[in-house]
Amino acid sequence: MSIRPPVDDWATDFDHLDPRWIEDPFPIWTELRRSCPVAHTDRFQGVYLPTRYKDIREIAYDTEAFSSRRVQVRATPPPVKSPAPPITSDPPHHRPARMVLLPPFTPAAVDKLIPETQAICNELIDQFAGKDQCDAAVDYAQHIPVRVIAQMLGLPASDGEKFREWVHGLIEAAVLDDEAMVRTLAEMNAYFLEQVQRRRETPADDLISYLVAARINGEPLTDNHILGTLRLLLIAGIDTTWSGIGACLWHLARTTEDRRRLVAEPTLMPTAIEELLRAYSPVTMARLITRDTIVGGCPYKAGQMVLLSFPAANRDPAMFSDADRVVIDRKENRHAAFGLGIHRCIGSNLARTELTVAVEEFLKRIPEFRLVDPEAVRWSEGAVRGPRVLPLWLG
């Protein structure tokens, strides 16, 4: 990360790339919610940050004043257009693009992936089981969604390192680096275009072939539509779930009571996963403000951006009791980890399954683990938050 001016006032000059934010954003959001629930910064061409659940929800549902044509806050205007339908689509184009993607991500379709996901997890655990230490992010969390989404798309798992480089290039580096964005997009488009051409010649039982065969209003998807959707599926399918798995293991490594309770009461896992999703939601999205408007008494100026921090919404005490406390048997939990409104995550069933399987298999094989050093944990930069270095003592 480049050297940046430090933040003196989070309410008027926030920076989500500031090391203090990256390390621990929760107290920052708590203070803002108390003193200035809608922060603003002139950095990144002007950005608003609502911190209350109700404001974030209202913005997410208002697709006229808040457009999804741009979903990433950047230091400069995007050097190239990179639509990724349906996430960058506004009505009326959004619904057809979304409907095309729903069948491969139904609960029934995702359930078929459970045995392979379990096998992936155990193959990874085999590499460090019996050792004193592992890095739960590097040795485990980052590989699971890469291999699952590669299988779904019909891509070689051996390209995993390339995929992770693209995640960094588009989600982290591209915020400040135009060249990184242009280069990454060019590499991804060339890679996927070759894959699309292969499926046109020889269809297979995978998501790329599915998109090639898909129709909207009787017409095939354009190459740009297919390429944008494939970029979305790969990046979103890897980064968010990788971050979520890592955050779950980070919490359990530092919270002995919760870890041992899950080992003793495995039927509690679904409820615990929902709570961990609420408490450590990975994803913050952005919207482009298309017209001057007011939400929750605060004016939003056209042409600027707004960060929809679903993680901040999930820590709002007006919505959740003991919002900053992780309660793994929490009964009422209408969290926004997968977003709100028409852009709610299509892959939520897949993400839940991967998180659940990853945590279940880890606890079965390694029920006792703890952080080597809390200060050694390193978190990602940008709009998706999760541990990228997570050293654990095992046993």
Image (cartoon, rainbow, N blue to C red):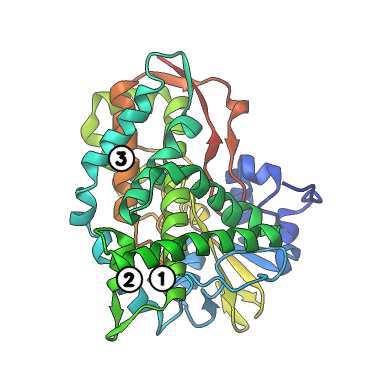
* SS class, disc 3: helix
The residue identified by callout 2 is 212
**For the residues bearing labels 1 and 2, Cβ distance under 8 angstroms:** yes
Classed neighbour count for the residue bearing mark 3: other residues with Cα under 10 Å, few (<14), some (14–19), many (≥20): many
Image position, residue 294 (x, y; %): 58, 78
| Residue 297 appears in the figure | no
* SS class, disc 1: helix
The residue drawn where x is 57% and y is 45% is 26
The residue identified by callout 1 is 226
Given residues 142 and 67, the one toward you in this image is 142
In this rendering, would 74 be left or right of 126? right
What is the quadrant of residue 378 in the picture? top right
* SS class, disc 2: helix
Which circle marks residue 368 in the picture?
none
Given residues 222 and 340, the one toward you in this image is 222
Task: Name which residue type carries label 3.
Answer: Thr
Task: Name which residue type carries label 2.
Answer: Val
The residue drawn where x is 31% and y is 29% is 122
The mark nearer the N terminus, 1 or 2, is: 2
The mark nearer the N terminus, 1 or 3, is: 1
Name the mark nearer the viewer: 3 or 2: 2
Question: Label 1 vs label 3: CA separation?
Answer: 30 Å
| Residue 237 appears in the figure | yes
What is the quadrant of residue 346 in the picture? bottom left
Instruction: Pick the quarter of the image with the C terminus.
Output: top left
Classed neighbour count for the residue bearing mark 1: other residues with Cα under 10 Å, few (<14), some (14–19), many (≥20): many
Q: Is residue 138 above or below residue 16?
A: above
What is the quadrant of residue 186 in the picture? bottom right
Which residue sits furthest front?
201
Image position, residue 247 (x, y; %): 46, 38
Question: Label 1 vs label 2: CA separation?
Answer: 7 Å
Question: Label 3 vs label 2: CA separation?
Answer: 31 Å
